[in-house]
Each structure stands twice: as structure tokens, then as C-alpha cells.
Amino acid sequence: MRLFLMVFGLLTLASCTSKEQRAADVLKADVANKMKDPESSRFSKLKFHLSMLCGEVNAKNSFGAYAGAEPFTASSVSAQLRSEAEAIDANLAGAKIADKSRFTRIFDSKWEQCQRGGVVVE
């Protein structure tokens, strides 16, 4: 599976013209690998801003149905879905931390900044 995505990414890199598009293709493969069915991943609202790709991804779940578009951010360091930030906040709910929605708010802030200032990519 990963080999297929790596080969697909390399072939896509060879056919692209802009550096943003080449980087976006590699980062899309990282996001797709986080999905239950990576090959079914459909991307929308893609923008590239300051070495970060953001947008929405929709992929099939365990039942074989598309689960609905979910916001994501990806950089050379990591790829993160909004549901992952929400899960971290949910795990902190029992902890004695005043700001229990911190990770979700940070994610939303990064995503919105990328969407506002980013260059549209495919």
C-alpha cells in the first residue's frame, strides 16, 4: 500500500510544474495514509501556505461508505486531522487543565490561516 502511494507520488512529482503542487502531492499521500481506505481519499479545498497544505479529505470508513469531508493540515513534520485534535482534547477532559479545547483551537487557527492566505493547488 505504502509502496503504491510512494510510486504514485513520485510519478506525480515528475509531471508537476510548480513547487507548491509537487509538495502538495507528497503531503496528500501522507494524509491519505491516515485514512482507513487510503485509495478512496478525495481531496477538496486544497491550499498551500508557508510549507503547509490544508484542505478537506473524504474517504471510506470501515463500512465502505464515505464518512464526510474532514479538515486537515499537513507539513513536512506531520499531518493532522481535526478529529485527532478533538480526540486529544477529549482525553484531557478528565485532567485538571483549564483550557480543554486548546488543541482543537490551535488546529482551527492554523487551518483558517492557511485557507485565507494559501495558493490553490489540486
Image (cartoon, grey):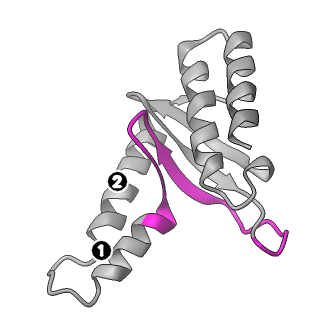
| 116 left or right of 98 in image | right
The answer to which of 97 and 2 lies nearer the viewer is 2
The image shows residue 24, relative to residue 101, as above or below, that is above
Question: Which type of secondary structure does the marked residue at label 2 adopt?
Answer: helix
Q: Which residue is mark 1?
A: 101
Quarter where residue 64 is shown: bottom right
Instruction: Provide residue 49's location: percent of width, then percent of height.
Output: 43, 31
Residue sitting farthest toward the right: 64
Assess whether residue 83 is covered by the magenta stretch: yes
The image shows residue 22, relative to residue 78, as above or below, that is above
| 34 left or right of 61 in image | left
Residue sitting farthest toward the bottom: 94
Tag 2: residue type? Ser
Assess whether residue 94 is covered by the magenta stretch: no
Circle 2 residues within 10 Å: few <14, some 14–19, many ≥20: few
From which residue to which does the magenta span run?
Answer: 62-84
Instruction: Provide residue 20's location: percent of width, then percent of height.
Output: 54, 20
Q: Which residue is mark 2?
A: 109
- Sequence-first disc among 2 and 1: 1
Q: Residue at x 73, y 69 (%)?
A: 67
Quarter where residue 85 is shown: bottom left
Instruction: Provide residue 122's location: percent of width, then percent of height.
Output: 69, 30
Q: Residue at x 25, y 78 (%)?
A: 100
The answer to which of 11 and 72 lies nearer the viewer is 11
Quarter where residue 47 is shown: top right
Q: Residue at x 65, y 52 (%)?
A: 57
Tag 1: residue type? Ser
